[in-house]
Amino acid sequence: MCLSIPSKVVKVSDDKTMCTVDTMGVQRDANLMMMDDDDVKIGDYVLLHIGFVMNKIDEDEALSSIETYKEILEVMDEEDRKRAILEDDECKARSQQYVEEIKS
Amino acid sequence: MTKTITIAHGNGGEENNELIKKIFYKNFENDILAKSEDAAVIEDGKLAFTTDSFTVSPLFFPGGDIGKLAVCGTCNDLAMMGAKPKYMTCSVIIEEGFSTRELEKIVKSMKTELEINGAIVVSGDTKVVPKGAVDKLFINTTGIGTIEHKGITASGLKEGMSILVSRDVGAHGATIFAAREGIELASSLQTDCASLYPQVRALMDSGINIVALRDATRGGVSAVLNEWAKTSDVCVEVREESIPVQEEVRGICEMLGFEAVDLANEGTFVLCVNKEDEPKALEVLQQTHTTSAVIATVSQQHKGRVILNSSWGTKRFLDLPTGELLPRIC
Amino acid sequence: MGLELKNLYDDFRDGDTIKAYAKIIAEDAKKLKKPISIMEVCGGHTHTIMKFGLPQLLPANVNFIHGPGCPVCIMPKERIDHAYVLAMQADVILVTLGDMIKVPGSNGSLQDARAKGADVRFVYSPMECIKIAEENPEKKVIFFAIGFETTTPMTAVLVDQVIKLNIPNIFFHINHVTVPEVMVELIDSRDVHVDSYNNQIDAFLGPSHVSVISGSKIYDKFPRDYGRPVVVTGFEPVDAMQGISMIVKQFVEERCELEVQYKRVVNHDGNLKAQALIEQYFEKMSLFRWRGLGNVPDSGLKLREAYKAYDAEVLYKDVLPIAEIEDHKLCICGDILRGMAKPQECTIFGTACKPTTPIGSCMVSSEGACAAYYKYGNLI
């Protein structure tokens, strides 16, 4: 429940008990004894906790979450834009400006 | 105060301040000491005078060693008072059995750094103690310099002023943790340990008025901002996303549960200038490090405190770090 | 587009996404029939919520109750004293994880013991015990094990290695506890002295790293038998906001379910190998006293009978204190751990009790509610 961090596997030991993981350019060794042999491969994303690999990170689920967030932001942006236009239309100062622009 | 001294009392944060105030300041009381700046200003503002002891472990780390640190640490304290480092002393306490070759290497590092500062060692002392009485090597350096920019003080901050940092933060602390036995990390991270006088000189030459200057050593940027907020009785409001942090320092902070602003630096300083001097100051800083940035403004919101403003509209206090920095677990 | 490591950090901390969820929650909360209180059980969640200022983003009718998910905070004083007593034994090197060092016992903390000359080492990983034992063959290395299900399998791996490699001088003092039992205790206490029906917990933000190991199956009973929705949530601020949003939606839509927000690492079954390791070396104790909560049945673990030769509690039972020790009378950590009080309601919060002079564990541990409030909680 505490500090467990996502890292990328860059090396696996021959006897499959240890691996080397990378977290933003910082590398350290991690223990694989909580994972089955061949479960973890180079390039996998894993969750690290007190020097052990706890589990793999499901890339598809991660990407799916990120996609969800993008969609939410797009909907928000769309609503914000509509609101901004509406506010703009209703803004007295703006309409005065339009009037002047049309005149000129 | 606790009955016995704990490691936390040496952390540069809250406990450290308590130790200094309740035992040392109380007994050595005088006006100059009470100012508690990076260096003491003596002889009517003409000279800056300071001392520092170095006990870093390991002795050699990526980008430096205890020797380089010993010269940078003290010369930087002088530079932070707007003084040009001139004369230094060097006292060493060596553990029996220490390698002569390593000692020579360390002293050579000191020589290189002295040249950068334009300072010379004029006096010193050497002691050798039995095995176990010290951990390999402890160095103390004392420095004296001529003040070239007067009026730099922690009590000069006023509302509206700008605060900048000279480069990305936390590199030294992160490097030391990474190099320390027991936590094996392999990365290309290096300490930021460097002599700051050349940069300070450049700032002085550019004609801006330096209001406050401090290198962010123990306790990191967090300690500096808090000290300034308290001493000047103002509020320092930091834009959290503007604090520059190297990827790898981020990585170590993630792994060990630290905050980069709490980590020690040995070649990074925080600068306060008037708002109108901000663009020029940034320009000068950028010439040495492209990671330098404007990170905060001075306000009256919560006097004596530092506020972190997040990019999503929340805020919280950034307090002095406490305790011994431990990797967080569960 | 492929996944990069940066995405796993940045995208789940994105300020705009956090703001977007705040809007969604605010909109949905308008439709709530009554205010809801969500317990975040896990200290890590408390920390995230406070550090990122999330309460500042939520509407008034959505509240947090901070739970007992801090394995150091819930250690009763007498067990903390065990660590101190073991550390002070002449031939012992006491090894434990970070936060235990500062927790105050009756005679002081492990940090105090170290200042008095005891050999106390804090480690990042339990496996470091092996090196310490090799370098100190004449000493007994006692691993003082703490933590929830997240950390228990790592201790099990160490036990496994100690046996397989025949290491003669590593022993264990086990203080591992489990989370579902205490969650039940909070809403349906079996202790006759506790009126748990007075609690306000409407839903749980489920501890997720626990369920990386145990699977989300451990929370099945909460919606089913206790009518409390559970959303198993990650630790980044976007995760937390999404989790809260999912809970609010359940109430608005009148559902009561177990959902997983933290899908990228949590599944129903969990890490079976880790579960097997725990099963092999540990068994449940019928009673384990949780600080502030009293005895929580079936929540504590101990080494199985077959491994008692490695059990420091057995080996040192003559010197280990057994009397229950109550906390300082002004300390209300117990109520805080139950979600019945907030840290600021404690009369000594921030004055006599601060991280530098902690009276109770909640202030010392970085996962404790009091420490989180002290550090981040004076929200403006």
Image (spheres, rainbow, N blue to C red):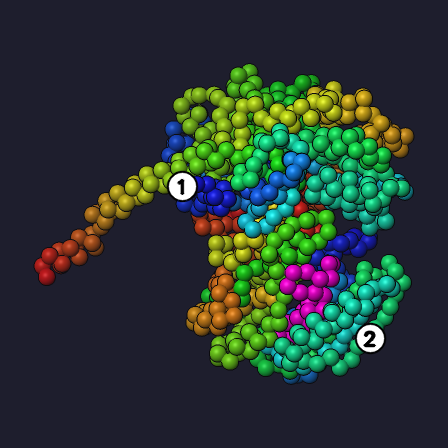
- Identify the element where label 2 is drawn: strand
Q: On the rendered structure, is B34 left or right of C235?
A: right
- Identify the element where label 1 is drawn: loop
Q: Where is mark 1, residue-wise?
A: C1
What secondary structure do most residues of the magenta stretch adopt?
A: helix
- Magenta includes B73? yes
Q: On the rendered structure, is B95 left or right of A69?
A: right
From this view, report whether residue B29 is shown above or below residue C164: below
Crowd tier of the residue under label 2, counting other residues whose Cα lies within 10 Å: few below 14, some 14–19, many 20 or above: few
Q: CA distance from mark 2 to mark 1?
A: 63 Å
Q: Where is mark 2, residue-wise?
A: B125
Crowd tier of the residue under label 1, counting other residues whose Cα lies within 10 Å: few below 14, some 14–19, many 20 or above: few
On what subunit does the disc labeled 1 rest? Answer: C
From this view, report whether residue B142 is shown above or below residue C344: below
Q: Which residues are magenta?
A: B57-79
Amino acid type assigned to the residue bearing label 2 in the image: Asp
Q: Are marks 2 and 1 on the same chain?
A: no
Q: Residue at x 47, y 29 (%)?
A: C247
Query: Percent x, y for residue C166?
Result: 82, 32
The picture quadrant where one finds residue C217 is top right
